[in-house]
Amino acid sequence: MPGQLGKKTRIGRLRQFVTIQSPTTTPAAFRGKVTAWANLEADVRAEVIATGGREIFQSGTTQAQYTHRVRMRYRTDVNSTCRLLWQDTGITLNIVACPPTVGAENLLELWCIVEEGT
């Protein structure tokens, strides 16, 4: 069942590293706001699993979209407004959902898509 990690998930699977970033907004020089990304924490151990991909035909062009599932130790400061930098590959993952993890033994599961341009 998606979102349920089960009690047999081993911490030894958290072999990869991600940097967690959250958006910050600052006033722009000429009205409006600028959104930048600030690191919440670097080198967080995680398990990054590629779950598939698809092609989207939009505005006369075909774009590839890859999806990933990321598991890490439970944190209260990570939500769907954050993003992850997968340090081994340089890929930026946008968090789509943080489903509830019933019986997950302190693990957080995130569903992500690859940010365009990475």
Image (cartoon, rainbow, N blue to C red):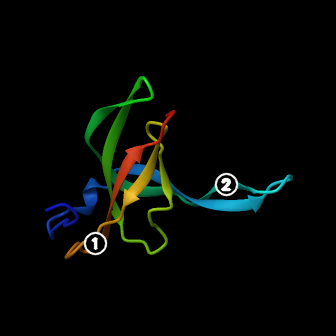
Q: In terms of sequence position, does the residue under pointer 1 or pointer 2 come before the other?
A: 2
Q: In terms of secondary structure, where does tag 2 sit?
A: strand
User: Where does residue 27 sit, x and y in percent of width and height?
Assistant: 79, 60
Query: Picture quarter containing residue 37?
Result: bottom right
Left or right of residue 33, residue 113 in this image: left
89 up-or-down from 40: above or below = above
Of residue 90 and residue 32, the one placed in the foreground of this image is 32
Left or right of residue 31, residue 106 in this image: left
User: Where does residue 5 sit, x and y in percent of width and height?
Assistant: 20, 65
51 up-or-down from 118: above or below = below
The residue depicted at 80 percent of the width and 55 percent of the height is: 28
87 up-or-down from 9: above or below = above
Of residue 113 and residue 90, the one placed in the foreground of this image is 113
Amino acid tagged 1: Pro
Amino acid tagged 2: Thr
The residue depicted at 82 percent of the width and 56 percent of the height is: 31
The residue depicted at 32 percent of the width and 46 percent of the height is: 68
For disc 2, the marked residue is 35
User: Where does residue 99 sit, x and y in percent of width and height?
Assistant: 30, 67
Q: Give residue 100's mark.
A: 1
Q: Dot 1, how many residues are within 10 Å of its Cα: few (below 14), some (14-19), or many (20+)?
A: some
